Amino acid sequence: MNAVDKQEPDADGPMVDVEGEREATVRPVEEGMFGLLFSGLAIAVSLFHIVANLAGTISTLWLTGVHFAGFAFLCALRHPAIHAKTASRRRAVLIFDILFGLIVAGATLGLIGSENAIYARGVRLSATEWVLIAIVLIGAIEFCRRTTGFIIPTLIVIALTYPVWWGTWIGGVFRFAGLSVETVAFRTIFADEGMFGSIAYISATFVFLFILFGAFLVRSGAGDFIIDLARAVAGRIVGGPGFVAVFASGLTGTISGSAVANTVSTGVITIPLMKRTGFPPKFAAGVEAASSTGGQLMPPIMGAGAFVMANYTQIPYLEIAAVSVLPAIVYFLSVAFYVRIEAKKQNLTGIDGDTPPVLEVMKRGGPAFLIPIAVLIGLLIYGFTPVYAASWAIVSVVVSSWLTPNRMGPKAIMEALILGAKNMVMTGVLLVSVGAVVNVIAMTGIGNTFSLMIADWSGGNLLIAVTLIALASLVLGMGLPVTAAYIVLATLSAPALHVLIQNGHLVSALAAGTVPIETGAIFALADPTILARLGAPMPIEEARAIIEATPPEVLALIYPQVLNPAVIAAALLSAHMIIFWLSQDSNVTPPVCLTAFAAAAIAKSPPMATGVTAWKLAKGLYIVPILFAYTNFIGGTPLEVFTIFLIAVLGVYALGATIEGHMEAPLGWPLRILTGAAGIALLWPNTPLLEAGGAVIIIAIFLWSVRQDRARQKVSVPAS
């Protein structure tokens, strides 16, 4: 690295847990005999997943069971039960953790092996199996406590006791008649929605192999190349260090699906650079936190929630990644605009000292780092599964590294296998354990109840529904990692959001008079008078009133009759993308914003003030979901999507300038108000005249501010 050395965290202080989204003190297991144990097991776990996924001969239950057993043991080694202060107590705790990890792993494998015997007894559990289930559940709860805190363990306990105990005590819509303890215990382990079901399968296949791919890229030197390239491209321009942070975090997002990992890997370079050139510490940390949060939104490797989304929606991951590119760019540009505005306000320049030329950076083997990404994307485009594509992309990393000075031999490969397993510990444990909660939601029907409540509270208003989900995501995000928050919210609220988006399309069809007359018979089930009004244009208010008066079960029959299947699929994907984006806000929203806190630790800035700054910079997390809800940003034609993209870029710039009161030059209050109004007009959906007028106003004000800035610079430069 040029100019700035990486700053390592204090060995005795809190370190950022890069496989999760929390700060934790972790055991340095890489040292000594126990380090060899962790490393050996990590290599074995990684190799098992590669072989099992490529061979495809192992059953889903055994794959997920071994997946949890391996990462449970690794979690026991990496995350101690308690933080002992003396060497003797640390050794005692480590021995306890090894035994506990072995017991949980053994119980998991024993329980999976007893599946046929359980079915042979008519789904009846023996005493031994009761003990094994208890050990697995206790292990899941404890390992979640160690890696994520008390919120997920509490949710698991509440979920498991709801159908067998307190659900019968409460009244209202959440009352549940109850199930036997044996039924709940069996389904928690063996049901498709349970701990070793679909979500665990996603963890053991897509998620882990993509995290492993990212680990191989990092070990091959891709991370250093990305930061050097960012410095070469953006370092010399005004606000350059801030742009380096945005650019590097965006590129790192293509190889890392963790916001905290993104922060600590790029922040140790970019935050000192920003501080050195004059950016305030809290702003520098906020930029890095906001930019790193976007890493989970940036294809080709998005956050783990994107793979869960592919499973929930049955939409290929490649399609999800493809539609995510332009929205992610809007988000990164929204952060970059703040950087530019702040640099102009502070009258800052680029990076002092030598900035490597782009050509020089590329000569260091740069193009070789693009080969694995190209292999991954190419295989996905040609229709191969993400698992197959990721596996060969890993191989291509090793091969292409020999075109660089950082050639990967056996030692480097083993280090990458260890790093991948280490980075997966929290995610692996979490995604298996959260299945206990998802199973109860599916088994009791509480998800449908919650969706109906959202539809009722919102009164059929999509904006209110999105606002309610945003508030719920923020509350959940205070205690849950973003992936868990997405899973819970998607299970509870995605159906309601999907219906509301589809209703919007139905309203448009009714207003335009494009609803087929044949559909009138279905509408007539709710109101026979509607027949006379179909087939001709009508006021939008009247169309909305018709949809609101039609029962949901009737609307369910109408959707496939009126809406194109592609529109229905786009509405479903939009609903999940809204929740996925909103679930990221806990990274940067006080009072609990762990990515911002990690950046604050590097910048030595006040954590809460940094969180507020990061929250301001990450406004794109709220703006883009509104575009998903009300426009064809997902599912539109290429021209529609690109037009929305351009309008969104202008809109987020206008709002940033309004908040800061500055473009290239300061904005007085009249111009500031006009800029804000133009920004709102740009982002107001489906209003072409307002959007065109807003664009003209923003461009005119920007050109005026450029002229003012140049005049100010001429005045500030003394005559020679």
Image (spheres, rainbow, N blue to C red):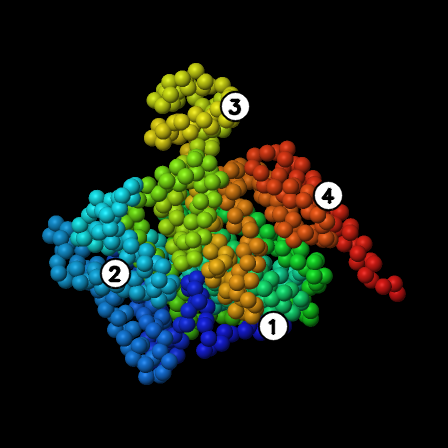
Q: 562 and 168: which one is in front?
A: 168
For the residues labelled 4 and 2, the Cα–Cα distance comes to 62 Å
- The residue beneath circle 3 is 539
Give the x, y percent position of residue 70.
Answer: 30, 65
**654 with respect to 218 (left or right):** right
Where residue 173 sits, quadrant-wise, is top left
First along the sequence among labels 1 and 2: 1
Q: Amino acid at mark 2?
A: Leu
210 lies above or below 504 = below
- The residue beneath circle 1 is 4
Quadrant assignment for the C terminus: bottom right
- The residue beneath circle 4 is 700
Query: Quick check: can you spot residue 99?
Result: yes
For mark 4, does the 10 Å Cα neighbourhood hold few (<14), some (14 to 19), or many (20 or more) residues? few
Q: Circle 1 sits in a helix, a strand or a loop, which is it?
A: loop
First along the sequence among labels 4 and 1: 1
**642 with respect to 162 (left or right):** right
